[in-house]
Image (cartoon, rainbow, N blue to C red):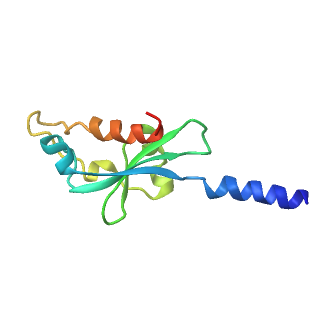
Amino acid sequence: MKTRIATGILYLLTSTAGAAATADISAQDLGTAWPLMIASGTLACRSDFSAPMTQLLTITDQAGNTYPLNGAASSRARQRGWFALESIWKANPAIPGTKIPITPLIQRAQALCDPKG
């Protein structure tokens, strides 16, 4: 009986590992502030159970390629098979040598981490 309970608890813990809250977003949502070379994607706030309280903010394109949006996600990108954000991040035409800020994407992904608001 104890083995069944332990197995059930382990199943519940592992079945929710890596679960992510998601929301679709597109260039139309941000207009000229859209910072990416892709037209749309799915934002996610993912839990990292190996590091409690760590939130991995990402965007996934229509082809299924995932890109990190914050430092915690960037540091785990290689081990998770994610792509470098720089490969799709637009240059800022107003300020040569810089990129269009991704702050609006980070803020929207961060809001997914706490659905209660």
> Which residue: 30% across, 41% down?
105
Q: Quadrant of the N terminus?
A: bottom right
> Which residue: 19% across, 39% down?
100
Query: Picture coordinates of residue 36 (x, y %)?
Result: 22, 49
Residue 45 in sight: yes
Query: Picture coordinates of residue 114 (x, y %)?
Result: 47, 37
In the image, is 106 to the left or to the right of 81? left
Nearest the viewer among 48 and 1 is 1
Nearest the viewer among 98 and 37 is 37
Residue 70 in sight: no
In the image, is 64 to the left or to the right of 104? right
Snapshot quadrant of residue 10: bottom right
> Which residue: 46% across, 53% down?
78
Nearest the viewer among 13 and 64 is 13
Query: Picture coordinates of residue 112 (x, y %)?
Result: 42, 42
> Which residue: 18% across, 36% down?
98
Q: Quadrant of the C terminus?
A: top left
Nearest the viewer among 22 and 116 is 116
